[in-house]
Image (cartoon, helix red, strand yellow):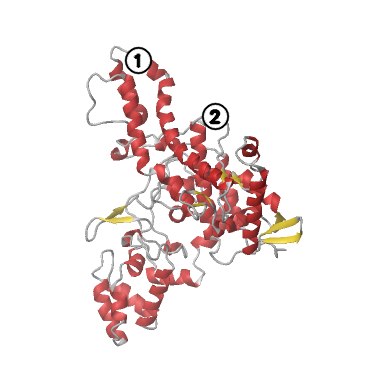
Amino acid sequence: MIPEPLKRPAVDADARRQMWVDEAIWGHRLYDEQSPWLTVLEFLTVLHARHGEPLVEPPDHDLTYRPQQQFCLRTLLFNNQSLEEVRGLGLHDSDAWSRWEASFLRKPGSHDSGQVTRLRQAFSSFDDFARVISLLRGMSHESLSNKRWTSRFVFPFGRAALYEDLRQESAETFSADRRFYARTGELLYLMLCRSGRGPQLLPKLEALFLGETSDFGRLVRVLQGAVDEVASSTRQGAYLPHLALPRYEALADDWLRVLNQPLPGLDCLPHLVAITGLHLLLYFLGRAHAELGRPSTEPTFVLEIVSPKRTAVRELSIASYDDNSSLPRKAVESHVRSVTAGAEWAAALVAPSPSAAALVVLRSRFSWSRDSIPTGVTPDGLLEATVEDALKRHGQHVAGIHAAWSRAIGLASRRASVRNRYAPTDAFLKSLVVCSVDGRCPLERFLETIHERYGLIVGPRQAEPLIRAGAADAEVFSDNAKRLEERLASLGLVRRLSDSCAYVVNPFTMSRP
């Protein structure tokens, strides 16, 4: 049963003209060009911007915040082509600073000679300054990306490193952009707010991401300076349809599991990103299941632990991937067609002008509009046109989420095959162990845990419905589980105590008292 969704939020006129179908099912909004990494970075940006009331959702559910923009930092790191040129000239230190300053002050943003004076005082030489820039630039997210400089992001070394995505309108005019910070981080923020785990999460997140005690955090603060540029207008418009879902709590519990690991520094971040991407996929597909009225709202993933030979598990993994890929599109069509079960549609069909009345219902329910609608079209024709437009819009970005995110977190790949299927990477398997194992546990219990929490099918016990249906026999899944044991052993994550007793170990908690 689908929980009753919250009322659609008040948004600006341009947004009101957009169809409201994907958003009604999943929220405003999920977006395929926003990777799980960028989703977590956007979440941290919101967390910092709402430092006065963090991880607490407003009573009216209207999430508002004013994020940092950090022009000095992002200019130094990503719009600073002259730095290496000046460094390579072999000039005297003062001449190098002067030559570089002339270029820096011409860059768009709020720059002045006082910032250069501050930087000269902070670094013993121009060469040291250039080395720090090169170091931090190399550690940034997508360091080799050719994205515009206003859409590139540094690793989150403290609050000074958190800022929003921007579009440059003119030489000195910038506006918020929603291409790479597409609000998915806002949805993540709302999910964690609604999980009920905010009080436990907050101190750990503040200590890790909003403090500046690390060497890198202090370097970022030195580059940016003490004054933070903050957006002049309030950001708002996030919408998460349901107030309570078990998925929110499961997501927050995994965040706590990762944050409670005795990992050094920010080494927990890749695991947070991977497990967040997995939970968002589960949310995305789970809402599609619910919209379609499937008996279970939890999707499953048949994992193939890559074998040198093509196996039945590979075929089932490909089929599992394809089935999950098709779910969101089916959910969109089902959602639009569900309007015909309502009293408003029934009333429209018996109105003096059924087509006009049906058009009012469709526009009210889905914000549907076309520049021209043929005369004489029937209510059914209007409904089909609405379905067509909803599916076309869905195909632009939301339909790509399953493929983009499953690859991004290492859940899916085409390794040794021309077809996408669920074939996890080593990094993804490590994140599963970090989230699922405290100390050590038998391999079979680990397989059961990742099946119960995430719907991951590896061994014969988890694959029982497929085996009963005759899709494969137990032996191929036993071999699949054996290959997983070997993969984990090669990563130092399995210890075999005897021929019949293998344990999955979490190296970060094995030595914990």
Residue 424 in the figure: left or right of residue 35: right
* Residue 125 place in picture, x, y as percent: 37, 83
Q: Amino acid at mark 1?
A: Leu
Vertical placement of residue 128 versus 32, above or below: below
**Crowd tier of the residue under label 1, counting other residues whose Cα lies within 10 Å: few below 14, some 14–19, many 20 or above:** some
* Residue in the picture at 35% in, 55% down: 165
Q: Is residue 52 visible?
A: no
Quarter of the figure with residue 168: bottom left
For the point 34% across and 58% down, the residue is 151
In the rendered image, the vertical position of residue 447 relative to residue 505, given as above or below: above
Which corner quadrant holds the N terminus?
Answer: top right
- Helix, strand or loop under label 1: helix
Given residues 81 and 326, the one toward you in this image is 326
| Contact? badges 1 and 2 (CB < 8 Å) | no
Q: Position of residue 449 (x, y in %)?
A: 65, 48
Mark 1–mark 2 distance (CA, rounded to whole Å): 28 Å
Sequence order check, earlier mark of 1 and 2:
2
**Left or right: 495 in relation to 332:** right
Q: How many marks?
A: 2
Give the label on residue 96, or none: none
Front residue of 341 and 387: 387
> Which mark, by number, is residue 349?
1
Where is residue 18, by image quadrant?
Answer: top left
User: x and y percent of residue 311 in the render?
Assistant: 58, 48
Residue 66 seen in this snapshot: yes
Please give the residue where the numbered disc 2 appears in the rendered image.
Answer: 1
Query: Residue reaching furthest bottom?
Result: 92
Amino acid on which disc 2 is placed: Met
Q: Residue at x 71, y 55 (%)?
A: 441
Q: Quadrant of the C terminus?
A: bottom right
